[in-house]
Image (tube, helix red, strand yellow):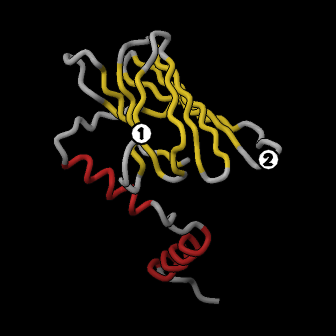
Amino acid sequence: MSELSRDALLAIVRDVWTERDPVPDHLVAAMQAAAAMADSDLDVELMSLVERSTELAGARGSSAYTLRFVHGDTDLLLRIAVDNGRSRVDGWIVPAEPMTIRALPGDTTGSHAAVVSDSGRFELTDLPVGLMRLRLEPHDVARPAFATPTFEI
């Protein structure tokens, strides 16, 4: 038995990764959307994902999970529920402050918006399933808008 050359060994490893862990179909579109956002005039400062948890699926095929994002002193908690191909996002901002939350679907076919209540709560209903990001627009003009990274519903 002969030893493999470095290039032959790397080719085998590449083939295994390509077969066992292919690039997700939506990754290229998600990166193109992020790059397009970076080229725009919008502030592209992103919140970081701190936590993700999954709850048990519902009896009628619905499912829900939570995401938590943090940006500076702003904490965003999301509960995302999916039922029959549509989704609902219930969210809480801490500390509560007047702002508009815009859901920006990855397919850029439109957006949904909600205003944060005095308690920091908001809800976005009838959202499409797929790639999504939320843009947070404080009503205080001295504070720039910022967004979550793209996540999948």
Identify the image quadrant of the N terminus: bottom right
Relative image position of residue 125 (x, y in whole percent): 53, 37
Q: In this picture, is 44 found above or below 28?
A: above
**Residue at screen point 59% across, 88% down:** 2
Question: What is the residue that sits farthest to the front in this orientation?
Answer: 126
**Residue at screen point 53% across, 29% down:** 68
Q: Residues within 10 Å of mark 1 (few under 14, many from 20)?
A: some
- For badge 2, the amino acid type reads Arg
The residue tagged with tag 2: helix, strand or loop? loop
Q: Is residue 22 left or right of residue 116?
A: right
Relative image position of residue 84 (x, y in whole percent): 67, 52
Q: Residues within 10 Å of mark 2 (few under 14, many from 20)?
A: few
Residue highlighted by disc 1 = 112
Residue highlighted by disc 2 = 60
In the foreground, 84 or 23:
84
- For badge 1, the amino acid type reads His
**Residue at screen point 37% across, 54% down:** 109
In the foreground, 48 or 21:
48
| Label placed on residue 137 | none
To which quarter of the image does residue 56 belong? top right
